[in-house]
Amino acid sequence: MSIPAIMEVWQTAHNFSSASAHHDAMRMFFTVQDNLRKEKAEAEGNAKMGGIVDKLLAQVDTELGAYKQLMEGNYFVALGVTRNSSNGDVKKAYRKLALKHHPDKVAGGGGCGGANDLFPMIQNAYEVLSDPAGRKKYQATANVDSCMRKQKHQAAQEEKRQAQEEKRRKAHEQHQKDRFERRQRAEQEQQRGAYKTDGPPRGDYTKPQYHEDPEDYYKEHQKKWEKRRAEEENIAWKKRMEEMRRRKAHADAEHERKKKKEDKEEEERRRKERKKRDEEWAEQLKERERKEKMKRIVKLVELRGMKPREIKERLVALGHDVKGMIEREDYVKKYCVVTGQKYVAAGEAPEPPRERPQPKKPQKKDDGTYAEFEERVRRMNVKGLKAFVIGRGGNIKGLVEKGEFIDAALDTYVAPEKVGGMGRTAFGRGGGGG
């Protein structure tokens, strides 16, 4: 098949691809690939034709790769069904594709090939989608739009690469041609003896070694050019390194400046928070002191000089309800009732304070017998012993154990008063009867 015929088949494959006939398009792409490989084998000695065929082969391989990815990554497209299709629809689609693309069906028909490569993909898709459970679990990894975009992108990249290679090839050919022309001119000038009579056209030809072989001149010129290029690259590299160091130093300084600014802002924020907390705490202390002051009980005389609002606050501070009170005297009466004071109306003289009667000191009685006193003391606990000893004027300093408190309490024992002159007591006989 000639190149124009191959291009016609290729154009037909593109038309099928645009019409979403992916199976027919793939088979035509396979046919184009096989024919291009044959053309490359025939044009082995023709470099120009070989380059053209290589370019076309690369583009066909790219398009076929996109189609293979689509068929292997999306079984629904490979069979032409959807996820909601029934088992009968899946079998029907498979049989239709098998009749058209099975290798045994198209082997003797000639025309379009590629069935050997296409039908295994269809068969793999049918094996997965024929099972309803497997069809529900299957997740496609490719879709038509993404594969077509990838195909066009790869084709554009390949075309760009081929253009760059062609540009480099032409530049190399032009360089070789210019070099050959310069060498011919130098040989002609050497034959005419232009170096000895009229002088060289360029200063480098004054050197005697270039009079004998012009190739040495070009080699020396190439060495100088390479040396100069290496020096320029070294200078450029140093400039780049210096620029990188300068940028790094600038970035570090900027980072340090931002860090200092952030630290300063953070410190200012914390200082403001501390100040706010201190102010709130001072306000709380002030409010607490005011409430404690309001809880302090004042006399009726001092209460008369206060405003109704302050009396109301004092009642609230003491935990009493003031609802329904309007007049000032209502607050005063309520406060007197709460604090236990006698209410006296405004303008009346208060009664003189009564003298409190002094409590009579209890007469000290005896403790009975010592045994009874000791038994009563030993039944007390430590707290009762302390109070007992202190009440009797004893000293409990340095006492820790219960036994020590018992001994101190026993020391406060008061014996019964003696009766008569012979030592007889109220609870026993005297010791002198004989």
Image (cartoon, rainbow, N blue to C red):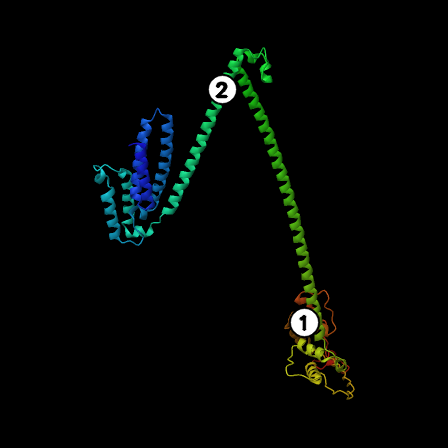
* Viewer-side residue, 204 vs 202: 202
Residue 59 in view, yes or no: yes
In the rendered structure, the answer to whether residue 376 lies left or right of residue 346 reads left
Q: Secondary structure at mark 1?
A: helix
Task: Give the image quarter of residue 243.
Answer: top right
* Circle 2: element type: helix
How many numbered callouts?
2
Q: Which mark is residue 250?
A: none
Q: Residue 50 appears at what percent x and percent y?
A: 36, 28
Instruction: Say which residue label 1 marks.
Output: 385
Q: Residue at x 28, y 44 (%)?
A: 122
Question: Which of 51 and 385 lies nearest the eye of the viewer?
Answer: 51
Q: Is residue 432 left or right of residue 178?
A: right
Q: Residues within 10 Å of mark 1 (few under 14, many from 20)?
A: many
Label 2: which residue?
Answer: 181
Above or below, 133 against 196 in this view is below
Residue 125: x percent and y percent? 29, 46
Quarter of the figure with the N terminus: top left
What residue is rendered at 47% in x and 22% in y? 177
Residue at the farthest bottom position: 348
